[in-house]
Image (cartoon, grey):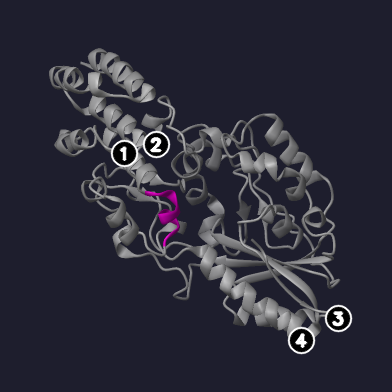
Amino acid sequence: MPTSTSNPSQGSVNRAELRAAALAEGFDTVGFAPAEFGAQPGKYLEDFIAAGRYGDMDWIVEKAARRQHPQALWPDAKSVIMLGLNYGPEIDPLAYLEESDRGVISVYAQGRDYHDVVKKKLKRLARGIVRDYGGDVKVFVDTAPVMEKPLAAKAGLGWQGKHTNLLSREFGSWLFLGCIFTTHEIAPDVAVEGSCGSCTACLDICPTNAFPAPYQLDARRCISYLTIETKAHIEREMRPLIGNRIYGCDDCLAVCPWNKYAKRASELKLHPRPELIAPLLADLVKLDDTAFRTLFSGSPVKRLGRNRFVRNVLIAIGNSGRPEFLDAVTSLLTDESPIVRVAAVWALGRLAIPEVYSETFDKLVGQETDAEVRTEWTLSKRNNNEQA
């Protein structure tokens, strides 16, 4: 939920002072946009929904009317203060994709949860606005129906690239966004006229072909959606394409040529935790709920929950080609969670020789009570025999 602060007495906002206060708070870039930002972003959202590209993220449909326009969310809003926090990585996010014994966690999730970090900064800045200038404010960090990227573009922070993410001349693809809606009318910044030119690097590198066209995303094929958002079983055709990515995907961000101009994160704002930089799959697959919560305390990964996370780990293991993982996979064939069992059966089918798979099949399939897990046993047996 957004945080709201108000003071009925409203004075004129000093843009320079507010920009300085935002930078002093630790933000790396700040811009101002009118709350009235036109109908085009809402039209893009309508097209996205009409094409069914939101997958099982039903909340996008349910909150579409409020998301389409800032003033649909808060009619009193006159201006939006957009703020960016640089999280440019020091290590190449693609460096560990060939390390089949390790899992790759998206750069943004290797440190503290950015929602908490950014929101605290926004709230302190918002309180200062109310204290100094009066009026009402609300703060948002990626948890309310706000189209941050079009607003950031309107505020001059960057432009939306062909991968649909915000691009900045100063920070490349690596900006966390937060915003403050206010009843103040603040002179807007000039929107950035950025360009991706003829470059298609972000589209070409996508392992799952999640971009139907430049500037369009089909979330159903996006690894970030598959490993983070969906609560369902990951489609069988998508699993081999995920590789060892166990939480999110940075490929389209990391390959962007604009990153070569990007500044690296200078402060200790969101430094990665060493244990979350390409952790060993052998350690992760053993996590029970308590160990999972302990490892990912304070991390956005924690919201995923142990079962879906282990599902992702098992898919990475199934893609590893490493038979040494068979004991760990076998131990999860009777896990309490069906979403874990489906992934374990699939990984077994990828790693075990047919004789071992058939023996395990005969032992366990008759005990399985979940229809989807039983179906996975049958499909994986067929594929296992074909691969032999």
Give the residues drawn in magenta, as a range: 299-305
Q: In this view, does 26 lie above or below 388?
A: below
Find out whether the residues at labels 1 and 4 contact each other: C-beta distance under 8 Å: no
Q: Mark 2 points at which residue?
A: 242
Name the residue type under label 4: Asp
Alpha carbon of mark 2 to alpha carbon of mark 1: how far? Answer: 7 Å
Residue 137's quadrant in the figure? bottom right
Q: Which of marks 2 and 1 is nearer the N terminus?
A: 2
Q: Name the residue under label 4.
A: 132
Alpha carbon of mark 3 to alpha carbon of mark 4: how far? Answer: 9 Å
Name the residue type under label 1: Ala
Q: Where is residue 25 in the image (x, y as percent from the top left)?
A: 59, 80
Q: Mark 1 points at which residue?
A: 316
Q: Name the residue under label 3.
A: 10
Q: Earlier in the sequence, mark 1 or mark 4?
A: 4
Q: Where is residue 157 in the image (x, y as percent from the top left)?
A: 68, 62
Q: What is the residue that sits farthest to the bottom in this orientation? A: 132
> Can you say which quadrant of the picture contains the C terminus?
top left
Q: How many marks?
A: 4
Local crowd at mark 2 within 10 Å, few (<14), some, or many (≥20)? many
Q: Where is residue 272 in the image (x, y as percent from the top left)?
A: 38, 64
Q: Position of residue 58 (x, y in %)?
A: 62, 39
Q: Residue at 30% across / 32% down in the picture?
A: 341
Name the residue type under label 3: Gln
